[in-house]
Image (cartoon, grey):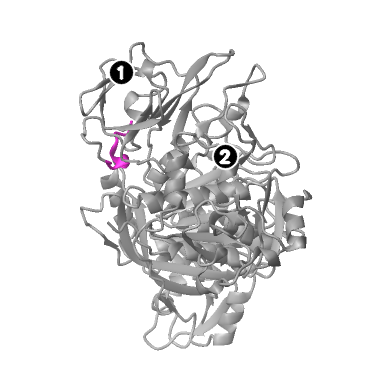
Amino acid sequence: MKLLQQVSFATVTFLLAEHSTASARAEMKDAPSVVITFDGGKVSENIRDVLNVLELSGVSVSSEPSVLKKGETVCSALLHLGYPEPCNPMLQVVARINGRSEELLATVAAGETILFPSIFLSTRKRETTRYRTEETGTYMENITKNWSHFQFKVDGKIENKFVTTVTYVQYEAVVAAKTAQLAHKGYDSLIESDLQNISISLRGIGGSTIKLNSGPSTVDKSLIENACKQGITWSDVDYSDYIDMDADAVHYYSDARKDNTLTKINVMLMDGPLSPAGNLYPTLGAGALRFFSTKTCGWVAFEQLKNHANLMAGIIASQRATGFVGIWPRVNIKPFNLFEDIGRVMENVAYYLQSDNDSRPDVYLFASSIEPIGTETYWNNPDARLRTSEGSAIENFLNIVVTAAPPVENGNALVVNAQLRKFPQNFGDNANVIVVTACEDCTRGAAKLTERAGVSNPEEGQIKFVHVAAPTGTVTGWVGDTEIASTDGGTSQAAAYVAGMVAGMIAKYPTYYAYPPIIKYRVQICSWPLPSFRGGQVNEEVGKIAAGVVDPGVCLLDPSKTWLKRGNGWEPIDFAHWEKDVTIDRASPSNALRLMRVAGASPGSTEWRVYSKRENRPSPRRPAKGLGSINQIVDAQISANAALVTCAGERIKLSDVSDLLFVTTNNPGDCPAVAEDITSSPVK
């Protein structure tokens, strides 16, 4: 089933006025500008309100004169210039510009000169996809109402139960500002406003808005450095060895990684410039050099902008016999250089996200943070992110995004939430975004998160915006065709680990992992949890991420089966139902995703750790909020004599089980277990 619908970007540009020249319009587009797109709603009123907000913020909207022709009215002239119907809201703007009342405008005769706002207005055909929920009927009513005047068309295919597609006409306005500072003020004012159905970006603003979330290393990897100097080979460094995988599950991962029959998954590397390098052939296609030898390597100092993308690509896809082995070498790396057009980075990212039309989820890796220039760390309005161009794009995105948790600022770890001005981390509650932090000591029972990365709100009951951890520390690899370098201590590398793991999951089980929330659930529940206690004290790090440290071995178990451990290794079962009267405190047994026995507070003791599905609480504006998010229950109290029953009729006592991993979409009573639409669970 094709879940991701194609997005069309054929653009028709309306002339502002008959006397406007092409060069004038080009100059307007290249100047420091605020770009506003209007998605449904009452567009004419929205354009009026946007211009009012910009005027109040100090962005004085320029005007140009136009002579009314015979038979024209001010209203018909507005429509001729490309403004949407009805024209009455824009008449208010024209009246203000001309210093006349709306009544006097109605009496303007042919041959008179009228000032009209000088903005670059255009339209494009858009297709947008939205997650369907229990409240699909109400939500669809809101969509069709929003697009009622804009040629909307709803995809009514009943078999597509995951998403709904709406086709409509989108308006875009480019409003020039005299200075970059004024453009910023106008942008911030619109973002913080309560206007609906709009998204905003900046254009023509210089400076970097991207922070690559890793830093240069001063560690000397003498073994490889000496090998390079002497022109000799060394044993391949396998990046997966940095991960403490379940010993009983390692072979599921290693066997799958060697399977050359699996489809190559696209990994979109949203990063700095990527240069062809032999360790990535054929991942980059013909662009990567066929000839490669470790004997031609040289050690270089790591340069963040120049080398970052190549190291991330290598962590994912370095090929065997190149000195390093990637987490999942069988992928197609597709680079997107965030630094290529820094003045339009937000806009370019939004368009790129909207244009993906693959039939299965691609993996987008943001080993970085993107943020508005010269602004505060947090927005005041929690809905502000929904009005950014990139935020609007990610809301309807049907691919999976893996992103690095942002680094500390001024020595303090950021709390990642909806108000954080860092994209895409501030969409960590969305159904398609996985935020990855890093662990310094990544061994079971002792795992410790890095102190140099953002964290979730540790308060119980809050949706966690940071989900899992993966290894960091000193990571060495190819950064060019002949150059090797190291970085140390960032979350970028950890995110690359997870992106490679997710690509493997989709490749191995493409039908099951066709829907981003399922992937997001699975990545979290396949992780092993941080210890409840450290040094005899409660480990406060547990509340800073949704789950724990990723485990590619467990994630490569067949997701259509329930898996358990009750002795030697993992065994698959078809789960039928819990026995009557089973209780798990703070969670419904039907929402349980994984139950694990882990070390308790005292030496030799154990406790139950539970990952469970959160309630999905959609709203007309954000129907996918919380989808794919989990709860983690520490020291869960489970009813005595709890037991489950398999489809074969076997009764399994929980007291005999050490680990129980459910089908993510488990539906008790289905035999064998069949994946269901997880969005159809009752909303309380």
Q: Which residue is label 1 attached to?
A: 643
Along the viewing direction, whichever of 455 and 384 lies nearer the viewer: 455
Task: Please indicate whether residue 241 sits to the left or right of residue 17 in the image.
Answer: right
Q: Which amino acid does label 2 sit on?
A: Ala
- Residue at image coords 45%, 19%: 636
Residue 235 point in image, percent of width and height: 63, 52
Q: What residue type is labelled 1?
A: Ala
Q: What stretch is highlighted in magenta?
A: 675-684
Q: What element carries label 1?
A: strand
Vertical position of residue 445 compared to residue 407: above or below: above
Q: Is the magenta stretch mostly helix, strand or loop?
A: loop
Residue 571 point in image, percent of width and height: 35, 31
- Residue at image coords 26%, 49%: 161
Q: Is mark 2 on a helix, strand or loop?
A: strand
Q: Which residue is label 2 attached to?
A: 469
Q: Earlier in the sequence, mark 2 or mark 1?
A: 2
- The residue carrying pointer 2 sits among few (fewer than 14), some (14 to 19) or many (20 or more) residues within 10 Å by Cα, namely many
Vertical position of residue 324 compared to residue 653: above or below: below
Residue 113 point in image, percent of width and height: 52, 83
Residue 678 is covered by the magenta coloring: yes
Task: Please indicate whether residue 441 sits to the left or right of residue 423 in the image.
Answer: right
Along the viewing direction, whichever of 464 and 475 lies nearer the viewer: 475
Quadrant (top left, top right, bottom left, bottom right) of the C terminus? top left
Q: Which of marks 2 and 1 is in front?
A: 1
- Of the numbered discs in the image, which one, if any, rests on residue 681? none
Quadrant (top left, top right, bottom left, bottom right) of the N terminus? bottom left
Along the viewing direction, whichever of 161 and 445 lies nearer the viewer: 445
- Residue at image coords 61%, 68%: 292
Q: Between marks 2 and 1, how big is the CA–CA gap?
A: 32 Å
